[in-house]
Amino acid sequence: MEQQGYLEIRKQRKYLIMGLLVAIAAIDATVFFTAGSEIEYYISDLSRVSTIGAAAVLSLVVVSRQGIHGLFGKAYAMLAAGLILWVAAESIWAYHELVLAQETPFPSLADAFWLAAYGPIGYHMFSTSKFFGRGIKKHVILVVTAAAIIFSYFYLQAIIDVSTLEGAEAMTAVGISVAYPVFDAIILVPAILMITNAGRGQLTSIPWIFVAMLLLVIADSLLGLSAVVDFAGQTFHITMIFNAAYLCFMAGLLWYNKQFIFNAKNAAKLM
Amino acid sequence: MVNKLQFGKLPNDGDASQTIVRKAIDNAISALGGPIHKTIIWHMNNRGVFANPKKIDINFFYDNLRELLGPGADMIMEDTWEHLQKQHGVHFDRDFERKHTPAEKIRKVMEIGEA
């Protein structure tokens, strides 16, 4: 009975991974093959709004099903708040680009929403780290923290060195570009630690939300560098990473919704 | 080591200590959230961990919890131990506390209760 339950969980995980890979491949292939064309901005912006929007809707489903009590109740409510802020940010960005025809609107109101989301997302990451991070050795925490600080230092240097922005908004733009890696570095520490501590537990072997955050930090870092050189060159690859990150959020929320929140139908399958 | 255990409000009785440990486990899992509590208890029941309502094999429980939740199992065991300490005043001497995991300490409490 127990063995069958485990096999069913493994099967469901395999399907989720396959579904995730197919979704990433399909959406990112569309972004890739339309890069440089007239519809590039439409595809890039709409793909990001759709993927983060779907993740936000799923997070609301999770919150409505489990409530906001307990460690995970609060953590997932905060994740939902963060994802909604990112939906607002992506939508504002898309509105500027697609409706107002402003190419790469940076800095803009979207940045305020993006940056505001770090609070609730950070809460989610650090509070669930208490659960996923048991048993991590102190020296590993020190090494990862040091690596995140070093990454931030060199990244900030690179941003300041390559910055080509001029004018009144340049300081604001560089300031915002600096804020992202600082917040990212803070988020990066639990993300890397939880990923290195993963692989155990039938329900917990893939820390989806932490994987999503790692991808998001990579995309953010590339975007930050791109922003300070005034978005010279292609940025479709950054959109592809953002999409992959948002889809990982979705996968994590689907998994959590199905496996963690009690569901009699799924329970019957596991018996 | 046994004489250095302080039971506090915990009765020195096998059945009572089993009930209290079970309640502490329940509280620790509940702290994660109601629906997750239901899921974890369902999995444990499905594996026969709580088959005997009057007796919990703490090793069997811990092994199954680790299999299900990986490192999260240790948080539940730590919270269970913390609950026993706070609600029932159970304490070992500092040396024992430092050298043993929460699962080992809970097992010791149950062994002493049964003796």
Image (cartoon, grey):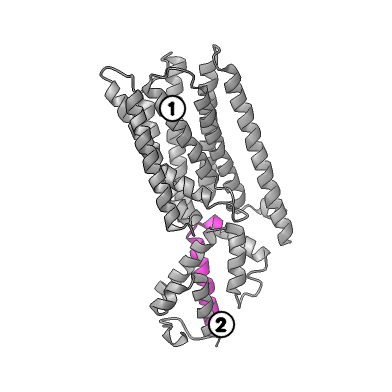
Name the amino acid type tagged 2.
Asp
Closest to the observer, B105 or B8:
B105
Q: Which residue is mark 2?
A: B15
In the image, taking residue A127 as reference, residue A270 lies left or right, namely right
Q: Chain of mark 1?
A: A
Can the viewer see residue A180 in this picture? Answer: no
* Image location of residue A187, percent across then percent down: 42, 43
| Circle 1 residues within 10 Å: few <14, some 14–19, many ≥20 | some
Amino acid carrying label 1: it is Leu
Q: Is residue B19 above or below residue A39?
A: below
The C terminus of chain B - image quarter: bottom right
Q: Which residues are magenta?
A: B16-36
Give me the chain letter of mark 2: B
Give the percent coordinates (x, y) of residue A262: 60, 54
Q: How many marks?
A: 2
Q: Decide which of A113, A163 is in the foreground and name it.
A: A163
Under circle 1, the secondary element is: helix
Element type at mark 2: helix
Q: Toward the viewer: B57 or A99?
A: B57
The magenta stretch spans residue B24? yes
Which residue appears farthest toward the left when viewing the image?
Answer: A168
The structure residue drawn at horizontal position 49% and vertical position 56%, both measured from the top left corner, is A131
- Determine which of the numbered discs, if any, sits on residue A223 in the image: 1
Image point (37%, 38%), residue name: A152
**Spatial CA span between label 1 and label 2:** 62 Å
| Same chain? Circles 1 and 2 | no
Left/right placement of residue A113 relative to residue B72 reads left
Q: Main secondary structure of the magenta part?
A: helix
Position in image of residue B57 (x %, y %): 61, 74
For this view, does B9 lie left or right of residue A253? left
